[in-house]
């Protein structure tokens, strides 16, 4: 069962899983967009990521695959993401993200796999 679409700036709370899923939407024309992290074409499911986290004053959002979004938040804290954005450091320079990008490069747009949480 897939989550119902909500607006670009909306949010969805799943009480059953006690999980807050930020800014989901179903793309109307995925063929024209690419993922902010991996650069692959977006699939049917698109999430919106804040390069500067909302908790750090970020307002801009960028389209991203759900698996790419989960990986970012599994590897980096909000403080890390804000610091990288302020320094202009590309996230792809981080070894874990570089390894992920090499692995995901040839996967289809709607590919999904479990993402390990940060320890």
Image (spheres, grey):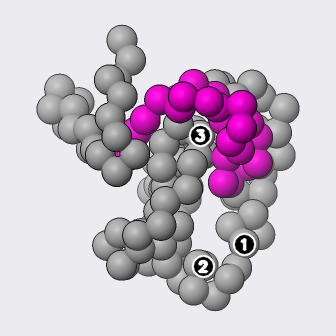
| Residue 63 visible somewhere in the drawing | yes
**Of 104 and 61, which appears nearest the observer?**
61
Mark closer to the observer (2, 3): 3
> Would residue 68 be counted in the magenta stretch?
no
Residue extent of the magenta highlight: 23-44
Which residue in the structure is indicated by mark 3? 65
- Residue drawn at (53%, 67%) of the image: 51
State left or right for residue 14 relative to residue 48: left
Front residue (pair 79, 42): 42
Secondary structure character of the magenta stretch overall: loop
Q: x, y percentage for residue 99?
A: 77, 51
Q: Residue at x 64, y 31 (%)?
A: 30
**Residue 11 point in image, percent of width and height:** 28, 44
Query: Which SS class for mark 1?
Result: loop
Residue at 53% x, 37% y: name it. Answer: 46
Structural distance between the alpha carbons of marks 1 and 2: 7 Å
Characterize the local packing of mark 1: few (<14), some (14-19) or many (20 or more) Cα atoms within 10 angstroms.
few
Relative horizontal placement of residue 106, taking residue 62 as reference (left or right): right
Q: Which residue is mark 1?
A: 90
- Quick one: label 1 or label 2, which is nearer the N terminus? 2
Q: Is residue 15 left or right of residue 112?
A: left
* SS for callout 3: loop
Q: Mark 2 — residue?
A: 84
Q: Is residue 46 left or right of residue 14?
A: right
Asked if residue 34 lies in the magenta stretch, the reply is: yes
Q: Earlier in the sequence, mark 2 or mark 3?
A: 3
Q: Residue furthest left?
A: 15
Q: Quadrant of residue 75?
A: bottom right
Which is more N-terminal, label 3 or label 1? 3
């Amino acid at each position: 069962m897939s989550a119902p679409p909500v607006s670009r700036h909306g949010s969805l709370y799943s009480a059953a899983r006690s999980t807050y899923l930020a800014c989901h939407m179903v793309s109307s024309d995925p063929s024209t967009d690419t993922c902010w992290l991996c650069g692959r074409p977006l699939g049917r499911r698109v999430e919106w990521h804040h390069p500067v986290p909302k908790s750090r004053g970020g307002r801009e959002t960028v389209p991203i695959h759900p698996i790419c979004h989960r990986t970012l938040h599994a590897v980096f804290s909000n403080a890390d993401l804000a610091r990288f954005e302020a320094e202009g450091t590309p996230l792809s320079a981080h070894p874990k993200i570089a390894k992920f990008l090499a692995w995901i490069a040839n996967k289809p747009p709607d590919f999904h796999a479990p993402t390990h949480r940060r320890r």
